[in-house]
Each structure stands twice: as C-alpha cells, then as structure tokens.
Image: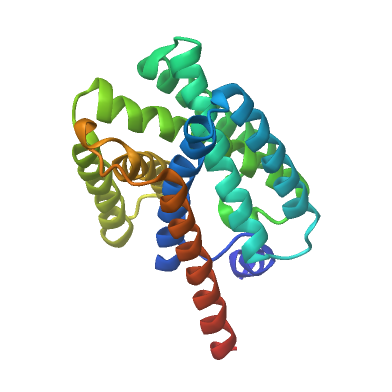
Amino acid sequence: MKEHSESALAKVPALTLSFWIIKIAATTLGETGGDAVSMSMNLGYLVSTGIFAAIFLLAVGAQIRARRYHPYVYWTTIIATTTVGTTLADYADRSLGIGYAGGSTLLLVLLLASLAIWYRTMGSIAVATVNAPREEMFYWVTIMFSQTLGTALGDWTADTAGLGYDGGALIFGGLLALVAAAYFWTRISRTSLFWVAFILTRPLGAVLGDFLDKPLSDGGLALSRITASAVLLAFIIGCIAFVQRRARQKS
C-alpha cells in the first residue's frame, strides 16, 4: 500500500512500454540535436554545452517547482539532459583528449557515486520515491551522468571498438532485451533493472543518432541533423499526446 501511495505522488511517468519508446527517441534526438548545434551550426562543443546546460537548469527548475507530473515538462528535461550529455561527452572525449575509454570510465565512476550517495542519503533509489525536491535533485543528477556516459559509451563501441553504428545498435538492443527478460522471468530488483535499462537506452540512442546523420562513408545514412531532429521531436510530441489521450479515456 505504501508503494502504491508513493507511486501516485511521484512526479515521473509510469514505466510502461510507451515510456521506453519515448526514452529511446529522446536519447536519439539528444545525439542528432547536440550534433546539429555543435557541428552543423559550428558552435563547437564547449559553447553548445553551455547552451544546453542553461536549458537543462531551466527545465530542472520547472520540473522541481511543479507539484505533479507534467509530461511535457518532464520530457523536455530528459531531452535537455541528453543533448547536454552529447556535447559534454564529445567535449571531454575529443577536445580535452580524454578519449572514449577514459571518458566512459570517469563517467561510470561518477554515475555509481551518484547512485551510492543518493541511496545512502535517502535510503532508496526507486523511481516511485521521486516526489520531493531533494529526491528530484539526486534523480536528475544521476540521469545527467547516465546520459553523458551513454554518449561516450556509444561512441566507444561504434568507433574505437570498430563495431560500427549498426553493430553498436545490435549490442545495446540485445542487452536491453536481456534486461527485459530478467524483468519478466527473474526476481532481480526492479529498481536495479530500471537503472540498467535507463542507462543502456542512452548508448543505443547515441549509435542510432549517429547512424542517421553520419556520412555514408562512415556507415551512416547522411541525413540532415536538423531534419532528423525535427522528425524525432515531432514523433516524441505525438507519442506524449497519444499517451495523454489514452489516460484521459481510461479515467
């Protein structure tokens, strides 16, 4: 009964299939959108990171001030974390010369530290408990690290490991399928499975985004980053509207 009451108060969406579809689309948009600003508009990784960081802070502020779950505010914040994660990871990996392996390792340590501090402070990292400003701050910091890690990890798999964008998509898609199987057929902690799945959707989105906009010579489809981003944004808005309409029909 307590878990149900916490879920009702949570300011995050229910973890349904639609959530994961929108999450993957949002992470793909983060890759194409981040590249569109930093590369297509020639603003560079550092300036682009500053722009997206400002948007992220504004979105998080709106999310924390909200008294209940607002889908467009929530998903705007998610998209902001994934765009700033894209440009921040690219800046660290390429401009600072840390490399994909170094960047991925550093971000994994930061992500695990964030989860550990959150658990030690609040006693739980379950999404159902995200219903107050303190929990939300931990939630969004953790998501920020996971989105940035996903970018570095996706690039590392596709480029350094030489698996290409399609190979990277197959690996991360397969890992997500294993997490789904564990959810349905094992008793592994649902909270642990959520965070593993949440983290894995980001590198999947990273390789999918690169596949859409990278040159044909690099194994991509050479689509316009701005066009791809606009299509993905329209798809996300359409999905949110569909979910909201279904929810109204059931109420």
Front one among 137 and 202: 202
Q: Which colouring convention does the figure follow?
A: rainbow
* Residue 242 left/right relative to 51: left
Q: Position of residue 200 (x, y in %)?
A: 37, 42
Task: Tell which residue pokes out farthest to the top in this image.
Answer: 97
Residue 162: quadrant of the picture: top left
Point 33% across, 46% down: residue? 223
* Residue 120 left/right relative to 94: right
Residue 143 appears in the rendering = no
Q: Position of residue 220 (x, y in %)?
A: 25, 39
Residue 171 appears in the rendering = yes
| Mark count | 0
Residue 209: quadrant of the picture: top left
- Quarter holding the N terminus? bottom right
* Residue 80 left/right relative to 133: left
Q: Is residue 232 above or below residue 133?
A: below
- Quarter holding the C terminus? bottom right
Point 54% across, 27% down: residue? 88
Q: Position of residue 114 (x, y in %)?
A: 59, 31
Front one among 51 and 71: 51
Residue 244: quadrant of the picture: bottom right
* Residue 134 left/right relative to 217: right
Q: Is residue 205 above or below residue 150?
A: below
Point 41% across, 27% down: residue? 152
Q: Position of residue 157 (x, y in %)?
A: 27, 29
Front one among 24 and 31: 31
Q: Is residue 189 above or below residue 84?
A: below
